[in-house]
Amino acid sequence: LNYTRVILSSQAERDKASSDHSSTQGGSTVTFADLVTQVTATAAPRLTFYSDEDRIELAGPTIGRWASKISGLLLADLGVEAGALVAVRLDSHWRALMWGLGVLQAGCTLDLGRSADFAGADVAVATTEEDLAEATEAGVLDVLAQPLPSLALAWPGTVPAGTEDAAQAVMSQPDALV
């Protein structure tokens, strides 16, 4: 999971692009939904993340629940629409992958990485107070403070003004999109 910045477009833009350049597997187009289904279909560990502080294994269904919770937050609580730009400024971390899957599942455009641009974003997700302040100054209406420790249930300390605690907001969502 090494990257500096990834930008993926909305489903409509991906559909248009796939008509010209489609990935194939056995002669058929592999869609984002197919990829998520393949990843979430088994209870076996699908992602193992190591850092200096953490080690975590996520099974397929767990990855699916994270994606659904994030999609639910975006669609139900924040009211974003298909194609909305979600800037996720996270380092190489398992939470970055979960945010990426959830954003794409919601049909939004994803700008992911340490250099994600908050200008013009509808939603911003960040892990440092400096980045959260930058998102707020850029005029992003929905700014989410994401703690990185694997077992974090809330932002450490007081959530900066103009932001919402992403850990609490995501965990309050249902395990499946409704």
Image: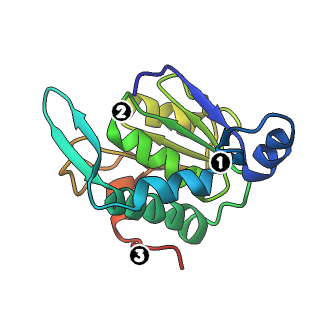
How far is mark 2 from mark 3, CA to CA? 27 Å
Q: Residues within 10 Å of mark 1 (few under 14, many from 20)?
A: some
Q: Which residue is mark 2?
A: 128
Residue 27 location (% of width, % of height): 71, 44
Q: Residues within 10 Å of mark 2 (few under 14, many from 20)?
A: some
How far is mark 3 from mark 1, CA to CA? 27 Å
Q: Earlier in the sequence, mark 3 or mark 1?
A: 1
Q: Which residue is mark 3?
A: 174
Question: Are circles 1 and 2 on residues that touch, CB within 8 Å?
Answer: no
- Residue 165, picture quadrant: bottom left
Q: Earlier in the sequence, mark 2 or mark 3?
A: 2
Q: Secondary structure at mark 3?
A: loop
Q: Quadrant of the C terminus?
A: bottom right
Task: Please identify, in this view, whether the residue under mark 2 or under mark 3 is nearer the observer.
Answer: 3
Tell how many labels: 3
Residue appearing at x 73%, y 58% in the figure: 82
Quick check: can you spot residue 157? no
Which sits in the foreground, 116 or 161? 116
Q: Which residue is mark 1?
A: 30
